[in-house]
Image (tube, grey):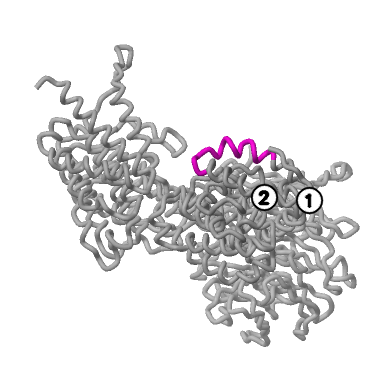
Amino acid sequence: VCFIPGGLDCSISFVSHVLGKVCVHGRQKEILGVLVPCLTDLTKSDCIWQRICWRLVECVPDRWMEAVVFGFVQRAPGAGVLSRLLGNLVVKNKKAQFVVTQKILLLQYGHTTTVLQNLLGYLSLDGHRRTLLLRVLQELLETWSSSSAVKHSPVEQQLYISKAILICLSHLKEPEIESCRQELLTSMMEGMKCHLDSSLPKLRRLGMVVAESISLKINTEGPVLKFEYEEDDETRELKSLLVQTPSFYVVPSLPDDDRSEKAGAALPLVLESNEKSRTAAPVVPDEELDAELDSDDDLIPYDMSEDKELKIKAPVYIRDCIEVLTGSRSEDTDKWEATVKALESLVRKNPAATREVSVELAKILLHLEEKTCTEGFVELRQRAQVAVLTTDPIPVAKYLTSQFYSLNYSLCQRMDILDVLVLAAQELSCPKFHTKTKHSGAQKPCIQLLLGSDSSKDWRRIVDERIKSKTRRFDMGQSRVELASRPNEFSSVAGYFFFPLIQHFDRPLTTFDLLGEDHFVLGRLVHTLAILMYLAVNTAAVTAMGKALLEFVWALRFHTDSYVRQGLLSCISSLLLSVPTEQILADMTEELLETQSWLGDVMEKDPDGDCRRLALQNLLLMENLKKKLEAVPS
Amino acid sequence: MALPPPDPQFVLRGTSAAVHTLHFSCGSPEPDIPLLFSGSENGFIHVWNLKTHRVDTALDGHGRKSVYCVKTMGGKDRLLSQGRDQRICLWDLAEGRTSVTDSVFTEHVGFCRCSLLKVAQGRWLMAMAARSMEEVQILELPSKTSVCTLKPEVGAKLGMPMCLKLWQLNCGSQPVLLAGYEDGSVVLWNVSMGKVLSQLICHQEPVMSLDFDSERAKGISGSSEKVLSIWSLNEQQNLQVYKTHELVNAGISDITIRPDKKILATAGWDHRIRIFGWKKLKPLAVLDYHTATVHCVSFSDHSNPQERLLAAGSKDQRISVWSIYAQT
């Protein structure tokens, strides 16, 4: 398409119409694929072509403006190019403004990071458009800091909004930050709160990264907000968005400003300069000293063979351990530490002695607080608790489950109880793992439940494996070595672990309300129940457990926290995997049908991607069940 | 065939509290009785008669707060004690008196023992940790006038001073202070000018105790880790590490070099007293008597070398007195 540049006032509105109509019919790729590179080249240095281009897009009728703008935004190779092509369209045309500032950023979330960068870069490049940039930032922050948005919108959308916020922040100049500093601060505080409240670790981390970045921008001198979280590709990518890439920008000074700002604000503490102090470089002693008459030879050393490392002995009897751990003598911290370290092995070596004092020991361990800075204290305590629970399951399980619902425990302690129950259940049901685990580094059982781990991920992996193994139906063959079999010790005690936990979940206490604020603990409880259900395969109580679990899941199925819903779906999975098919069909047919329709709903409408996946898995499992039944001759 | 280590010559019991500091006063000729001063955690200073092995006097001047430093000032009649009540007390013990003649309110809440240096007849310099975290104050006694305050530069981050030693090369030369700090470094200060002459990082952990031999210009420091560090002072007044010695168990509370500079003793957290030859730091003996951490060691100042003793005070409330390498 070539034009006659001749100072003539040509009307190109018909071209705009054509463009608009083509785009709205969905042919953006074809036409813009040719048009955009062409225009990019032409408008590079030629002002007239730029103006022509602007007129082109401005003349597109409103009803097709959206499609055209979308097309351009997605196809432009950089913010500078977009600026040249669209000019101040967003300022002049209401529809374009809506598309750019509202639709793409707030109502959709499928666009790539590059598109976001181009879009926001485009907004930042012109003085007229910068007001829009600020407005956009405010609206993004409003969404980011709104607690209902955090709770109900999908994780992908929240990631998208966070990226947009970071890119906006990277474009802001100092005077602009000054003017909206207060608002930034308020949104940061509110948003941080909502994000940290969330049960999903991914959202928490997102919140932390964005809050840190905002803090970095508004506090150029003085301490900045710094969270502790594990860096991974996502967080690194997000952080890199704060620093602009210099390639596409007309104004070269901006990227430098940002980078030096960031570096300056990053580490407020200056590490020791060490100019005056010297490091220890040993000086070789003079030769002369050796030649001197060594009067030291007169001094004959005594026998020093007894001089060995001082070892604090841990007590050898369980009751002594109890005394040390409950003792009020704060002097004996060495002994206390040695006792904590030795306790697990002592418990395992002396099962009879442990059984005499098992509940007391469990009580002490549940309340044990770290006295000295012992390495791995949390793990040591947990392993000791598991050892006690497996040695004397019934009374200790009764104690622990009753304490879970008692007053005056911290959330940490309640979750500790859940973790210990699961680890012990696992040990009891697959005893061969126990002999191999010596230290955390060695063979780990597949379900690790130390505080803070994302059990839903591990859980899903296990369910996946199980499903895989079921659907493929491999025949292992004779070459497989038979593993030594031991009786399933979990069978007799599964009920004691499971039923008390399910009993009181709807009874709130003054300090503990599972259905209210403490939904994070509810999520952990649900996951725990799922694992206990899974481990109860081949036990006598499994059917009763299954029924109870189904009722429990049914009561909670509309819970707003996605972590809880994921747990509920895992419960269904374990139920379907553990309870023998015949029992399921004999006792639970109606409930299962209801569950099936609920699962269908979840699969289609649940905002959380993980929930949808789990629901699909469950439906597949149910399908398998049906097929299995049909395969068996009645 | 090496002999087994000797047993203590005698053990002093009766403090009823952990012993934190010891000081001998055996220099005066007969008929004066050799004495040992000990400071305990219950705030008492016990004056032990080394002939009868009993307490002659018990001094109570620190409000039952732990006494962690005792020193004599030119004879057994004048005593200086430092306690956790943030005070340094000067005692007059002549002719059976037991009164506090003067006291200095240090406002120091740590455990840093003060250091005394006699600069002229009747005049002493005392270095002590002051109220401010990193500072060391030098006072002149008995006038209690401040000579100077040694402040590390801003940003040096030395931490609290942990141990001090004032010394001068000979009478009349400039007094110098060696200070060990919480960050593991030893700093040499020029007292009159109040400036740092040299600084050396000797340990990774706080310096617990140090001692210095001005004749050989060599010093030794112990810390809460397993390493003893020996450093030297060269002509330019610079500190350099001479060698290090690794111990079996970590933690040294006190180090002292015998006045004849032949041996030194260390008090360990592992309940053991170790004796080394000073020249080459040859390990000589490990005295394993106490059942709790040894807080302090001290050599006596007997004029007759044969009578020299070593005393160690421990958390187990006993003071063990040894006669070791007295023949050399």
Same chain letter for marks 2 and 1: yes
Taking the magenta stretch, the answer to whether it contains residue A34 is: yes
Q: In the rendered structure, which amino acid carries the disc numbered 2?
A: Ser
Q: How far apart are marks 2 and 1 (CA)?
A: 12 Å
Q: In which quarter of the image is residue B268?
A: bottom right
Residue A429 rendering spot, x and y as whole percentages: 26, 35
* Residue situated in front as seen by the camera: A334 or A79: A79
* Residue situated in front as seen by the camera: A436 or B298: A436
Tell me, yes or no, if residue B189 can be seen here. Answer: yes
The chain identifier of the residue carrying mark 2 reads A
Q: Quadrant of residue A472?
A: top left
Quadrant of the snapshot with the N terminus of chain B: top right
Residue shown at 80%/81% (left/top)?
B122
Which numbered circle lies on residue A11?
2
The residue at which mark 1 appears reads as: A7
The chain identifier of the residue carrying mark 1 reads A
Residue A188 rendering spot, x and y as whole percentages: 53, 64
Residue shown at 20%/57% (left/top)?
A504
